[in-house]
Image (spheres, rainbow, N blue to C red):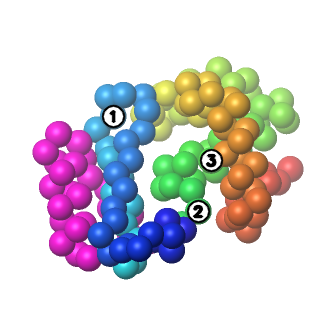
Amino acid sequence: MLADRIKHPERASVCISSAPFPNEACRSHSGVKILRRRISKAVDFVNSFGHVPVKVHKDVVGFLMNRINGAAFREAMSLVEKGVATPEDIDKACITDFNWNIGPFEIADNAGLDVYKRVGKALMIWAPVIFPPAQS
């Protein structure tokens, strides 16, 4: 993890905002070693430009929304592979039923399918227990 590779992890905080922009949520990823005052400063910084801070309290492989979206995307892919629904219909369902701005396939398309493939492979190497393949 990042905290293990830097000299003063108690000084580190990472703020991430998701596409599509503008996106109002910004995650503040802070390892367990960070000082509480650093978290407060990160939250104040995020608030200063009108975003909504979401604190992530533990360093894990992948980031908060990548992990959640990865699970949704794997299930969406499984449903398409089984002929249950088309990518367009799954996106439409997520938009109308979950009030998402865009569905999992449009998210993947915007990020780049090549990026999804590389990230997916990396996460499967580093965290096979956390990211098991979708079950039939």
Q: Nearer the viewer, residue 100 or 68?
A: 68
Q: Earlier in the sequence, mark 2 or mark 3?
A: 2
Q: Nearer the viewer, mark 1 or mark 2?
A: 2
Q: Which residue is mark 2?
A: 61
Q: Position of residue 102 (x, y in %)?
A: 49, 27
Q: Nearer the viewer, residue 134 or 98?
A: 134
For the image, the number of numbered tags is 3
Q: Are marks 1 and 3 in contact (CB under 8 Å)?
A: no
Q: CA distance from mark 1 to mark 2?
A: 23 Å
Residue at (62% x, 28% y) in the render: 112
Q: CA distance from mark 1 to mark 3?
A: 19 Å
Q: Quadrant of residue 110?
A: top right
Q: Earlier in the sequence, mark 1 or mark 3?
A: 1
Give neighbour class at mark 3: few <14, some 14-19, many 20+ (Cα, 10 Å).
many
Vertical side of 66 occupied by 105: above or below: above
Q: Which residue is farthest front? A: 7
Callout 3: SS = helix
Q: Are marks 2 and 3 in contact (CB under 8 Å)?
A: no
Q: Nearer the viewer, residue 7 or 67?
A: 7
Q: Is residue 3 left or right of residue 110?
A: left
- What kind of residue is marked 1? Asn
Callout 1: SS = loop
Q: CA distance from mark 2 to mark 3?
A: 12 Å
- What kind of residue is marked 2? Val
Give neighbour class at mark 1: few <14, some 14-19, many 20+ (Cα, 10 Å).
few
Callout 2: SS = loop
Vertical side of 3 occupied by 87: above or below: above
Q: Which residue is mark 3?
A: 70
Q: Which residues are magenta?
A: 35-59
Q: Is residue 39 left or right of residue 8?
A: left
Q: Earlier in the sequence, mark 1 or mark 2?
A: 1
